[in-house]
Image (spheres, rainbow, N blue to C red):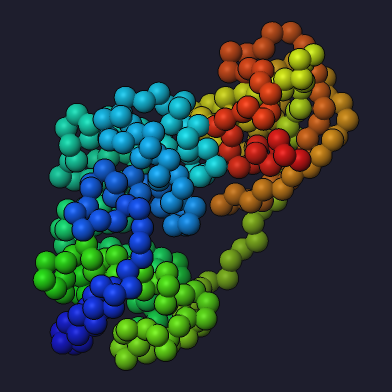
Amino acid sequence: MTQMFHNFTLQLLDWYDQNKRDLPWRSDDPNPYHVWLSEIMLQQTTVTAVKTYFLKFLDHYPTVQDLAQADEDTIMADWAGLGYYSRARNLHKASKIIASNGFPSDLTELAGVGRYTAAAINTIAFNKPAVVVDGNIERVMARVFKVEEPLPKAKPYLYELATPFFMEAHQNRSGDLAQAFMDLGSSICLPKNPKCDMCPINEFCKAQSDEYPKRAKKANKPQRTATCFWIENEAGEVLFEKRPPKGLLGGTIGLPCTDLTTGAMPDLMIDSGDTIGEVRHIFTHFALTMTIQKASVKGAIPSNCFWQKPENASGLSSLFRKVCLF
C-alpha cells in the first residue's frame, strides 16, 4: 500500500506540472497574504467567482497592512455580491492581527480560519505538510476507494483515507500536492461526467464513475417570504439601510424590509402601497420570495438609513441587487 501512495502522488505531481491552472494567487514563490486572502474568498464560493474579487482586493489593498487600515464599510462594499458576509468582517479582524504580528503559528486563532483553511494556508503559503481535504479531494477519495458510505456522514472516513497521500509529499512539495488534488477534482474528476480516460491516476481508481461519492438525499429547502419597501423622495432618491453587523447579510446595504428570519417589520414608520415586483433568491438554508412594495415613510429616519439613487448604491448584496434591477 505504501508503494501505491508513493506512485499515486508522483503521477499526480507529474500531471500537475504540465496542467496546473493559472490562478492569480498562485506563484512559484507564494505570497502568504495572497494565499490567505484567496482561501477566505474561496470558502463556499467558486474559483470563477473569486478571481475578479481577488484582483479587486489586491488593487485596493495591495498589502495586508492596507487591508488592516481600511474602513470596514469600504471593505464590505468591495465584498458585496460575493456572499457569506461574515467572511469579510473576519478578514478585516484577522488582517489587523497579521499586520501587527504576522501569521500566528496556530492559524485557527485568526477569525474565519478553521481546520481546512488553516491546513490549506500552511501547505500552500508555507509548504508545511498538512492534510488538506476540500470537496474536490473528498470526491477523489470516494472514487479511488469506491466508498459506499454517503456524504456528509463519510467526511471523517474520507479525511482518514486522504491522510497517507499527504504523508508522501515528494521532493518537499506539500503545497503543490494539495493544489494538484484540487486541480484534479476541478478539471478531471468532475462531479458529473468525470474525464476518467484523461485521469493521471485512473489505474488506482476503483470506481471511475460519477455514481460516487454517494450522497444522502437532500431535504427540500424551506420556503420563506419577506417584503421590502421601495421608498422614493422628491429627488428620485431611494431610501437604503445599512444592515446590522451580525446576522443574515450583516453589514451590507439593502432596502428596508421585513426581517428575513422572523418577518418583523423594520424600525420605520411606513405606509405601504402597491406591490410593484417580486424577486426570488436562494440562500444556503432556505429559499426566499421577496415582494417589493411602494411605500412612504413618516417621522424621523434612523441613523442607519440614507437616501441615494439606486444606480449609485454600493455594497449591495446579491439579493438587493436583484431588487434594484427588478
For this orientation, the residue located farthest to the left is 171
Left or right: 155 with respect to 160? right
- Which residue is painted at 72% across and 39% down in the image? 325
The answer to whether residue 110 shows anywhere in this view is: yes
Q: In which quarter of the image is residue 147?
A: bottom left
Left or right: 185 with respect to 248? left
For this orientation, the residue located farthest to the right is 274
- Which residue is painted at 42% across and 69% down in the image? 186
Left or right: 158 with respect to 53? left
In which quadrant of the rendered image does the C terminus lie? top right
Q: Where is residue 182 in the image (x, y as percent from the top left)?
A: 35, 67
Q: Quadrant of residue 177?
A: bottom left
- Which residue is painted at 65% across and 37% down in the image? 320
The answer to whether residue 255 shows anywhere in this view is: no
Tell how many labels.
0
Image: 82 above or below 231: below
- Which residue is painted at 46% across and 75% down in the image? 190
Image: 14 above or below 295: below
Q: Position of residue 252 (x, y in %)?
A: 54, 31
Image: 92 above or below 318: above
Left or right: 55 with respect to 211? left
For this orientation, the residue located farthest to the top is 299
Q: Where is residue 117 in the image (x, y as percent from the top left)?
A: 31, 52
In which quadrant of the rendered image does the N terminus lie? bottom left
Q: Where is residue 256 in the image (x, y as percent from the top left)?
A: 68, 26
Image: 232 above or below 101: above
Q: In which quarter of the image is residue 199?
A: bottom left
